[in-house]
Image (cartoon, rainbow, N blue to C red):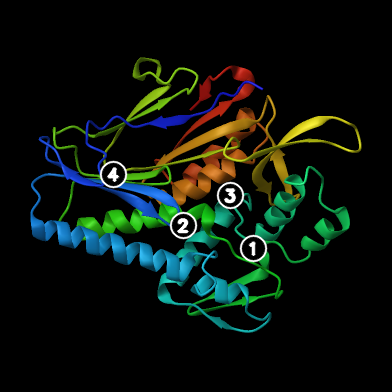
Amino acid sequence: MQKYFLLLLIFLFASCAEHSQDAGKITVFSDIAMTIRYKILIGGPFSPEDNKTVIAVIKSTFHEIDEVYNIWNPRSELSLINAGPAETPLHISPELENLLFLTDKLVKTTKGLYDPTIVPAYKMWKEALEKNTMPDPDRLALLKEFVGWKHIHLHPGFLVKDHRELQIDLGGIAKGFCVDLLTERLNASGFPNIYVEWGGEIRTSGKHPEGRPWKIYIGNPENPSREKAIDTLSLHNAALATSGDYLQQWKIQLPSSGETVVYSHIIHPYSLIPIIAGKSNICSATVLGDNCAVADALATAVMLLADIKEAEAWIPEVQKEYPGTDFWLVQREKSGETAK
């Protein structure tokens, strides 16, 4: 199957060494955090003391992400809440409370298309599809009893789950949230001109040392040259996030019809069924906004709409809540054309 989707092609004219400073006064920090590479570029003069400050911000921020929000860390605060009992007040730290209330707003804004409680359905589908089979329909039906953000009741300082089995996975927003934290903390530490990326989620502040905005080229991987870019973005105090159905896929023959379909890793929260990587669906979404956590969640949500036409009706409602947010969408049958 021929694929067309958005790819972020970043041309920043900067070194990609683990930590370096080039003649253009860009200092680069790049490493792996929680199996995902990050890259931070800082413009302007840079001293040995600045180096210590940046390293401390990076270390403390990723430590917080791991200790509070990471469900793959069994000792994290979120993991302990997931293991907690039902119908009992469960204490939440101010840090987690902040992100959960933002999540609550995004669930409501997207009318439930963004829902971080679908992790049990994802695990069930992934286990089945990796064995080239379908999940047991009865087991899947049982999940609908306790999957859904409506079963989470948030209060200042605590939350209550309706069901013990309910799980919260903030993976669809935590990368963007981490990028926001890094950007804001580095700004507060005296670095106004920076570019931060972790796992494809991006936020910038200030300007490139050349005096221009940070530039991002969005291109088609079939022809990734800068000259053939779908669009060129000049980012100044802005965030960018991308989601796509091509990141994980499983091809399977349906036992009922014999039809071969390609399932994506993105689970629809209404049906608890993965979206199909078909010809007419949205296969990639890039969202531009002020806040990377918000852009991250909205990029996932818009992927769940049937096609670009449905997205064009949905996007204005989201923009009422988040003015200035913009979307770049691609669907395969349009041969790589985008709707903006």
CA distance for labels 2 and 1? 17 Å
Label 3 secondary element: loop
Q: In which quarter of the image is residue 310?
A: top right
Looking at the rendered structure, the kind of residue marked 4 is Thr
Which dot, 4 or 1, sits closer to the camera? Answer: 4
Please give the residue where the numbered disc 4 appears in the rendered image. Answer: 204
Q: Position of residue 225 (x, y in %)?
A: 38, 18
Residue depicted at x 28% and y 44%: 204
Q: In which quarter of the image is residue 52?
A: bottom left
Report whether residue 189 is seen: no
Residue 149's label in the rendered image is: 1
Residue depicted at x 81% and y 45%: 133
Report if the CB atoms under discs 2 and 1 are less than 8 Å apart. no
Q: Position of residue 336 (x, y in %)?
A: 54, 20
Q: Which of marks 4 and 1 is nearer the N terminus?
A: 1
Q: In this view, does 272 lie to the left or right of 159?
A: right
Q: Which of marks 2 and 1 is nearer the N terminus?
A: 1
Q: Is residue 63 left or right of residue 337?
A: left
Depth order, front residue of 58/325: 58
Task: Rate crowding at label 2 as few (under 14), some (14 to 19) or many (20 or more) other CA atoms within 10 Å.
Answer: some
Which dot, 3 or 4, sits closer to the camera? Answer: 4
Please give the residue where the numbered disc 2 appears in the rendered image. Answer: 174
Report whether residue 253 is seen: yes
Please give the residue where the numbered disc 3 appears in the rendered image. Answer: 110
Which dot, 2 or 1, sits closer to the camera? Answer: 2
Task: Rate crowding at label 3 as few (under 14), some (14 to 19) or many (20 or more) other CA atoms within 10 Å.
Answer: some
CA distance for labels 3 and 4? 25 Å
Label 4 secondary element: strand
Report if the CB atoms under discs 4 and 1 are less than 8 Å apart. no
Is 125 above or below relative to 149? above
